[in-house]
Amino acid sequence: MDESVRTNQAVWDQAATKYVDEYDELLEQARGEWELFPRELELLGPVLAAAPTVVHFQSGHGLDDTALVRAGARTVLGIDYSVVTAAAAQRRAVEVGAPCRYVAAEVPAVPVRDGCVDLVYTGKGAVIWMRDIDAWARDAARVLRPGGSLFVYEAHPAVPLWTWDEDEPRIRADRSYFAESHVNDSFPGNGAREWQWTLGQLVTAVMRAGLRLDVLEEYAEPFWRPDDGYEAAAWSGRLPNAYALLAHK
């Protein structure tokens, strides 16, 4: 584990205490309130109809995993490099009786054997932690069976450029779409280094890994908004804030 990953892991373990402090609230969401986005369910409909085995790269609080099970997944294995996060997610899965297991490990180089899963699911704040996007894509392709799918629902690569001004969307003077990385200055990853990958780099990495692109969509709606109801002008429909990518082996 290199220094940037070690620093990010320390920051994320600290931030992940939120998943412990809010355990009861997240448990209720895991029981049935939390669902995948409607467009996720539409795009994944044929895959989930076949009761796939799923590996979730960077699984976080694990609520998407219980939602995947309710939508049709047979089992989900969550991989997250935060021991705090993986342990809390495992405890919730046991309490709700979901066939989800969690392993604390780094992505890529996940401890999963080659060609054993039907779906690799990831996103919603995951790809920004990847310092080698080609290695990430190769690892996804490695664990998939022939015909298996990679699905990503993620913040658009342009999002680090947008300010959170309420009156007009503006571009931050300290950010570049083509920068290698930037330091996060907001919760929950404050102080962590986020790696930046253009949409072209992401698609190229997936195809270079031997996967075939099925869907690439961009959305104006962000996948996350603050709980306090704050509305930034950048989220008003004029700018890209999220994307979905579906590919198969």
Image (cartoon, rainbow, N blue to C red):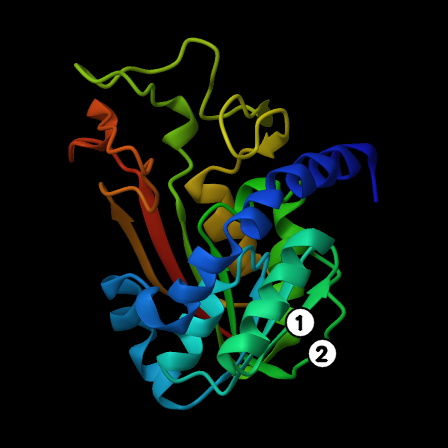
Amino acid type indicated by mark 1: Arg
- Residue 187 makes an appearance in the image: yes
Question: Would you call the spot at circle 1 few (<14 residues within 10 Å), some (14-19), or many (20 or more)?
Answer: many
Residue in the foreground of this view, choosing between 115 and 223: 223
SS state under label 1: helix
Residue 155 picture quarter: top left
Residue 181, horizontal then vertical, whole percent: 59, 27
Residue 218 versus residue 90 in the image, above or below: above
Tell me if label 2 and label 1 are in contact, CB under 8 Å.
yes
Residue shown at the point (74%, 78%) measured from the top left: 113
Numbered label attached to residue 142: 1
Residue 156, horizontal then vertical, whole percent: 38, 40
Residue shown at the point (55%, 40%) measured from the top left: 128
Amino acid type indicated by mark 2: Asp
Question: Would you call the spot at circle 2 few (<14 residues within 10 Å), some (14-19), or many (20 or more)?
Answer: few
Numbered label attached to residue 64: none
Residue shown at the point (43%, 68%) measured from the top left: 30
Residue 157 picture quarter: top left
Q: Is residue 123 left or right of residue 233?
A: right
Numbered label attached to residue 114: 2
Residue 147, horizontal then vertical, whole percent: 49, 83
Residue shown at the point (20%, 24%) measured from the top left: 233
